[in-house]
C-alpha cells in the first residue's frame, strides 16, 4: 500500500512539474508583443514595398528591414567570423519564350494553340523523309489521359519533348500556357551542366504521333540573369551548437501586375505573415538566451517563382545538421479549426507533429493535420526542398484554401488579416517548439526516397 501511494505521489509530482514548465513556457510567450507583430507586418505588407516582387528594387528594402530586425536583436550572420552580413546572395537565370512555330503534315499550328517551357535559347527539330527523329520525343495526351501527371513526369525526366494534347484539355492547357509565358527560372549555378537543358512544347491538336509524316518545330527564348537574396541569421547554440533548428518563411510576393500600375499585390498573408513570425520568434528566443541548439532564421526569396531561395540555401550547409525545419506559410487569418490555430503539412512524413502536440496537449492546444491533402501542399512551399534531403521539414499554416478569396489577389492586404489570431499562432509556435530549442526532443528523419523530385524544366 505504501509503495502504491509513493508511486502515485511521484506520478502526481511529475505531472505538476510538466504542467508548471508548460505554464511558464506559455506565460513567457507574452513577451512576444502584438504591437511589434503589427509593426512588422504593417511595413512588410505596405504599399511602399510594392508587393515585394523578386525582380524589384523594393524586395531589397524588405530584405534590409528583416536583416535590421535580426541585427538589433543580437542575431549574428552564419559566417560571422569572416564578417559576412545577413544577406545570402545568389543568381537565377530566367528563360522567357520569344517565338515558337510548329508545322505538322504541312499544317501550321496557330500560336494560341502552342505553349513552351524551355531552358534553351534556340532549338529546331524536324521530321521528313530524309530526317529521322532522334533528338526529341513525341507524346500523345488523349481525352481521358491525366495531362498534369504526364507533364509532371516529363518535367522530372528532363530532355526534349513535343506533347500533342487533345483539345478537350484546353482549359488546363491555357493555365500552363500563361504560366510558361512568364518564363522558366533556374539557379544560375545549375546552368553549368548542359545535361540539365530541356524543352517541352505543347500543342493543342487532334493529330496523333502515329499520323505524323512531316514536322518542323523551332523556338527562340531570351535569357536574363538576376541577383536575389535570402536573409539568414543565427542564435548560436549553448550546448549543442552543431545541431540546428531552422525557422523559415518566404518574404517575396507578386509585386505590381503588368498593365495594372496602381494595383499592388501586397501579400500580407502570403507571406508577410510568416516572415513576421520568424522575426518575432527570433526576437523571443534571443531574449531568452538559453537555447541549447543553434537557432537559424531564414527568410527566403523566389518561393513564388519556384522555390529557388530555399534550393540555394540547401546547398550551403549539411542537411544532416538540421534537426527540424519549421516553415511558416500564411498564418494571418484563423484556420477552419478556430482563431489562433494552425495545421501542418506532411504530418505522416515524420513524428515532428506528434512531438509538438505532446507539448501542446498540456495546455489544451494542438497542431492539426493538413485539411487539404488534395492540394499537395507539402510540395508547394520551401519545406519541400529540405524534406527531399531527409530533413524533418514541414510547413505550418492557417489559411483556408477552400474559402480564401484573397490568395494571390490584390485584396491580400493588411485589412484582410486577423492580427489577434496571427499573434496567438506565433506564441503557440514558440511554446510548441521550445523542446526543439532546448534539445529535449529530436524528430525522426524524412525518408527522402519516398518523395517526388523537383522538375528539371519548369
Image (cartoon, rainbow, N blue to C red):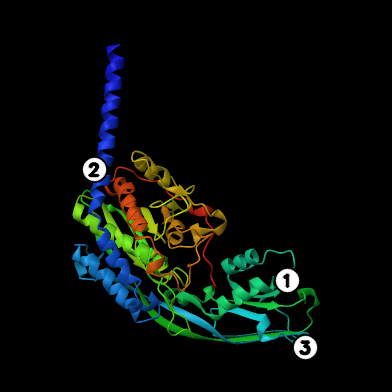
Marks 2 and 1, how far apart in space?
A: 60 Å
Tell me where residue 309 appears, x and y as whole percent.
40, 69
Please report whichever mark, 2 or 1, sits nearer to the chain's N-terminal start. 2
In the picture of the structure, the residue carrying the numbered disc 2 is 24
Which class describes the residues within 10 Å of circle 2: few (<14), some (14-19), or many (20+)?
Answer: few
| Callout 2–callout 3 Cβ contact below 8 Å | no
Tell me where residue 38 appears, x and y as whole percent.
29, 64
Vertical side of 60 occupied by 303: above or below: above
Please report whichever mark, 2 or 3, sits nearer to the chain's N-terminal start. 2
Provide the secondary structure element on which disc 3 rests: loop
- Res 420 → quadrant: bottom left
Q: Mark 2, mark 3: which one is toward the viewer?
A: 2
| Callout 2–callout 1 Cβ contact below 8 Å | no
Q: Is residue 399 left or right of residue 128?
A: left
Quadrant for the N terminus, please.
Answer: top left
Vertical side of 129 occupied by 457: above or below: above
In the picture of the structure, the residue carrying the numbered disc 1 is 168
Marks 2 and 3, how far apart in space?
A: 77 Å
Q: Is residue 113 left or right of residue 122?
A: right
Marks 1 and 3, how far apart in space?
A: 23 Å
Tell me where residue 367 appears, x and y as whole percent.
42, 47
Provide the secondary structure element on which disc 2 rests: helix
Provide the secondary structure element on which disc 1 rests: helix
Report the disc number at residue 47: none
Amino acid at each position: 500500500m505504501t509503495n502504491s501511494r509513493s508511486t502515485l505521489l511521484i506520478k502526481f509530482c511529475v505531472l505538476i512539474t510538466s504542467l508548471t514548465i508548460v505554464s511558464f513556457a506559455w506565460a513567457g510567450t507574452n513577451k512576444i508583443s502584438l504591437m511589434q507583430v503589427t509593426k512588422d507586418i504593417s511595413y512588410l505588407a505596405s504599399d511602399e514595398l510594392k508587393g515585394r516582387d523578386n525582380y524589384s528594387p523594393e524586395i531589397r528594402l524588405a530584405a534590409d528591414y528583416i536583416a535590421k530586425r535580426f541585427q538589433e536583436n543580437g542575431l549574428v550572420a552564419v559566417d560571422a567570423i569572416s564578417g559576412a552580413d545577413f544577406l545570402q546572395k545568389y543568381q537565377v537565370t530566367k528563360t522567357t519564350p520569344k517565338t515558337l512555330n510548329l508545322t505538322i503534315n504541312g499544317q501550321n499550328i496557330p500560336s494560341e494553340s502552342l505553349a513552351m517551357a524551355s531552358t534553351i535559347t534556340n532549338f529546331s527539330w524536324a521530321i521528313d523523309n530524309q530526317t529521322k527523329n532522334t533528338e526529341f520525343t513525341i507524346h500523345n495526351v488523349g481525352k481521358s489521359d491525366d495531362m498534369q501527371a504526364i507533364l509532371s513526369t516529363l518535367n522530372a525526366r528532363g530532355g526534349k519533348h513535343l506533347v500533342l494534347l487533345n483539345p478537350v484539355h484546353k482549359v488546363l492547357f491555357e493555365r500552363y500556357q500563361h504560366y510558361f509565358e512568364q518564363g522558366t527560372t533556374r539557379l544560375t549555378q545549375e546552368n553549368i551542366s548542359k545535361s540539365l537543358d530541356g524543352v517541352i512544347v505543347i500543342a493543342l491538336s487532334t493529330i496523333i504521333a502515329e499520323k505524323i509524316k512531316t514536322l518542323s518545330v523551332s523556338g527562340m527564348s531570351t535569357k536574363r540573369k538576376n541577383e536575389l537574396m535570402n536573409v539568414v541569421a543565427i542564435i548560436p547554440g549553448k550546448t549543442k551548437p552543431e545541431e540546428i533548428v531552422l525557422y523559415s518563411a518566404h518574404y517575396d510576393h507578386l509585386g505590381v501586375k503588368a498593365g495594372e500600375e496602381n494595383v499592388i499585390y501586397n501579400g500580407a498573408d502570403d507571406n508577410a505573415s510568416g516572415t513576421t513570425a520568424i522575426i518575432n520568434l527570433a526576437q523571443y528566443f534571443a531574449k531568452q538566451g538559453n537555447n541549447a541548439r543553434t537557432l537559424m532564421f531564414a527568410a527566403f526569396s523566389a518561393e513564388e517563382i519556384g522555390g529557388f531561395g530555399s534550393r540555394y540555401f540547401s546547398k550551403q550547409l549539411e542537411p544532416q545538421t538540421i534537426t527540424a525545419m519549421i516553415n511558416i506559410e500564411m498564418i494571418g487569418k484563423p484556420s477552419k479549426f478556430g482563431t489562433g490555430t494552425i495545421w501542418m503539412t506532411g504530418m505522416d512524413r515524420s513524428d515532428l507533429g506528434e512531438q509538438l502536440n505532446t507539448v501542446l496537449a498540456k495546455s489544451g492546444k494542438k497542431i492539426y493535420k493538413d485539411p487539404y491533402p488534395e492540394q499537395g501542399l507539402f510540395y508547394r512551399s520551401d519545406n519541400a526542398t529540405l524534406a527531399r534531403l531527409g530533413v524533418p521539414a514541414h510547413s505550418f499554416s492557417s489559411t483556408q484554401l477552400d474559402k480564401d478569396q484573397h490568395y494571390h489577389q490584390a485584396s491580400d492586404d493588411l485589412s484582410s488579416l486577423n492580427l489577434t489570431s496571427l499573434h496567438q499562432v506565433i506564441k503557440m509556435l514558440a511554446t510548441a517548439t521550445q523542446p526543439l530549442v532546448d534539445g529535449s526532443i529530436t524528430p525522426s528523419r524524412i525518408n527522402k526516397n519516398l518523395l517526388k523530385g523537383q522538375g528539371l524544366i519548369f
